[in-house]
Image (spheres, rainbow, N blue to C red):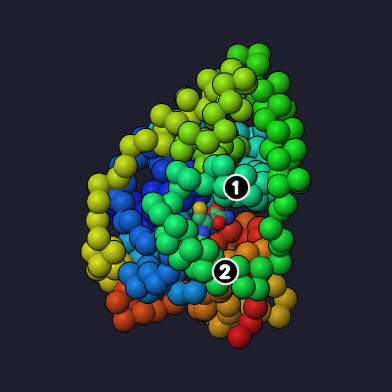
Amino acid sequence: MPELILHHYPESLFSEKARAMLNARGLAWRSVIIPMIMPRPDTVPLTGGYRRTPVMQVGADVYCDTAAIADYLDDKGTGTTFFPAASRLAAQTLARWTDTELFWAAVTLRFLPANAGSFFANAEAATTFAADRANFSQGATIRRLPVEEAAPRYQLFMDELQAQLSDGRAYLFGADWTIADFSVYHVLWFIHAGGAMADDLARRPAVKAWYQRMLAFGGPQGLNMTGTEALAVAAASTPEPLANGSSDIADIPIGALVDVGPTDYGVMPTRGELLHCDAATITISREHDRTGVVNVHFPRHGFGVTRV
Ligand SMILES: N[C@@H](CCC(=O)N[C@@H](CS)C(=O)NCC(=O)O)C(=O)O
């Protein structure tokens, strides 16, 4: 298997989800630290327009969104599946809810003046970040959650989490982890890693014990690689062959030129030739002079496909 290369930055919570999944499975990985804001000249050649973080590169294959990364990693390394049959529906549904609804509550809470202090080095960094994310939010179909909605949503979830874990189970659905553990973990990490809202954890001991267990997965970092080196890896590789590419969209056959992008926020699409589209996965092929041909993989859930 070619090296697993994560393009990420330390403060990114979805990157923390990917880092924790990689480490939990005992996988060696390479770390390309990308800027927290645009421009990202060494990432765009791989991803095209998609500008969310993280992305994972395996040779000349690029996995966008942690859902696609989880799917790819599930049969790699060691440890039980992220998607056990008996709780797959509940775990996936909780993961999707957490990665969107709880995530937006966490964003509001983390950037409250009382909590934001540990996130930005100085006021200028905060202003630059806000301007970048205003661009990122153009075309978004969701609204920023007011604190009056974010706080109770978060507190109710934390109470329910405490109740779920208080029988002493190691993970949310029992003795083994599922994808839901990693999704809940990275949202809590975003809020608590800088020491914000520490009381919320302290008064929920079962959540705190589970959080500490997950935190151990998040710690180790991959061996550093530069963006230029990662692009050279792509250029020297060919994408993994796709078995039986097909399209389930009646008027968009495989081979069509398409735009694929998130439908809720950070909606900037990637353009390429459709190789495969089913209920779970979308794969397109694109080319750049710094990478050669790469295949870019997205989850279907939360992404749209438009014929160009
Ligand atoms: N559903 C996506 C969400 C990714 C996401 O929203 N990432 C944030 C950073 S944690 C982002 O892209 N922010 C804008 C940026 O990094 O440019 C996933 O699971 O990967």
| Relative depth, front residue between 95 and 188 | 188
Where residue 189 appears, x then y in whole percent?
A: 51, 38
Q: What residue sits right under mark 2 in the picture?
A: 134
Q: Is residue 121 found left or right of 140 in the rendered image? A: left
Mark 2 is on which residue type?
Ala
Q: Is residue 224 above or below residue 200?
A: below
Residue at 53%, 36% in the rendered image: 196
Where is 55 relative to 109, above or below? below
Residue under the image location 38 percent in, 69 percent down: 40
Residue 20 seen in the current view: yes
How far apart are labels 2 and 1 at the CA level?
A: 17 Å
Between tags 2 and 1, which lies in front? 1
The local secondary structure at tag 2 comes to helix
- For the point 32% across and 42% down, which residue is it? 221
Q: At label 1, which amino acid type do we have?
A: Leu
Q: Secondary structure at mark 1?
A: loop
Q: x, y (%) of residue 132?
A: 50, 68
Label 1, residues with CA under 10 Å away: few <14, some 14-19, many ≥20: few
